[in-house]
Amino acid sequence: MNPLSAISLSMLDLVAVREGGSVADALAISLRTARHAESLGFKRYWLAEHHNMPGIASSATAVLVGYIAGGTQTIRVGSGGVMLPNHAPLVVAEAFGTLAELYPGRIDLGLGRAPGTDQITMRALRRDRVESEADFPRDVAELQQLLAAPEQGQRIVAVPGAGTEVPIWLLGSSLFSARLAAERGLPYAFASHFAPRLLLEALDVYRRNFRPSATLKNPYVVIGVPLIAAPSDEEAQFLASSTYQRVLGILHGNRGRLPPPVENYLSQLHPQERAAIDDFLAAAVIGGPNTVSQGLHALLQATVADEMMLVSDIFDPDLRLRSLEIAAACVA
């Protein structure tokens, strides 16, 4: 078992729009957070694709990746992920190929197969295209080819993109992407920050079925970890009430802006609502330094992950930066 100090920390940013704030504020907070994560030695900073959600400003994911990469120096920046069914592989290859030329050696391309939105918006994104289960593996293979060195006689070449070999990651919350990542010899990121139920089963499927590839010789696993760290358990629970409100809103179909924290929020809820939040956040680490250290260590023991990707939805941007500092100190 690797010690906690051997784990890499990274961050996934949903670019939350806060109550009383604007989209421009959310974007500025993301850049400031990325710079702070870089100063703490975080390995990568990913941005998620969502659409038609008033509380999340990360719909134009490739644009945001360029914004964050341009405002930082060394940290890897990528998508966590691009929802591939919403896009033609050639468009994705050209966008991320351009990013790779601008920021060589720093761009990641994480791919998901969920819509990242509701059914009506999905139809607006995809127009008349009907997705089948066979499309995602085929689109991943096409992207791999477009980002590789072009073959003689290849009629469609991504320019930019061809030859950049942008690292492709598969993301998922089920066993489908775990099997595909294993079959293709790709790194795998599990979305345990919002769907932890199949975490251990998916990692087992991925590792047991992994086939080495030209890009990856051994399995590589990233897990999503909701993190709220503070000087004390009590303050962390108070700050986490913003996340609890957001999760309950998602479960009720009300995806609003990130709200400020509320004292004793959980005690005001019905037991079924508390149980639903607990299920959603089963992989969460919330507390003071000792609790955070123990929580991260327990996750590492259970998953043997190579990397933990933190998701920290704290209303006060300064306290969010402090949360990342506490996590980094626990790992160091």
Image: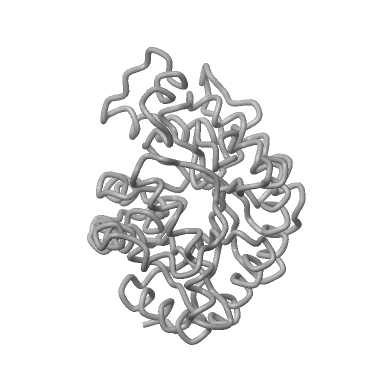
Instruction: Answer left or right for 50 relative to 204.
Output: right
Please determine whether, in this image, residue 149 is positioned above or below residue 27: above
Q: Position of residue 92 (x, y in %)?
A: 54, 31
The answer to which of 98 and 24 lies nearer the viewer is 24
Q: Position of residue 47 (x, y in %)?
A: 56, 47
Identity of the residue drawn at 45% across and 19% down:
124
Q: From the image, which quarter does the N terminus lie in?
A: bottom left
Q: Position of residue 269 (x, y in %)?
A: 33, 61
* Number of marks: 0
Please determine whether, in this image, residue 64 is positioned above or below residue 1: above
Q: Position of residue 143 (x, y in %)?
A: 47, 33
Instruction: Answer left or right for 259 relative to 224.
Output: right
The single residue placed furthest to the bottom in the displayed view is 290
The answer to which of 64 and 287 lies nearer the viewer is 287
Instruction: Answer left or right for 151 relative to 224.
Output: right
The answer to which of 277 and 73 lies nearer the viewer is 277
The type of colouring in the image is one colour
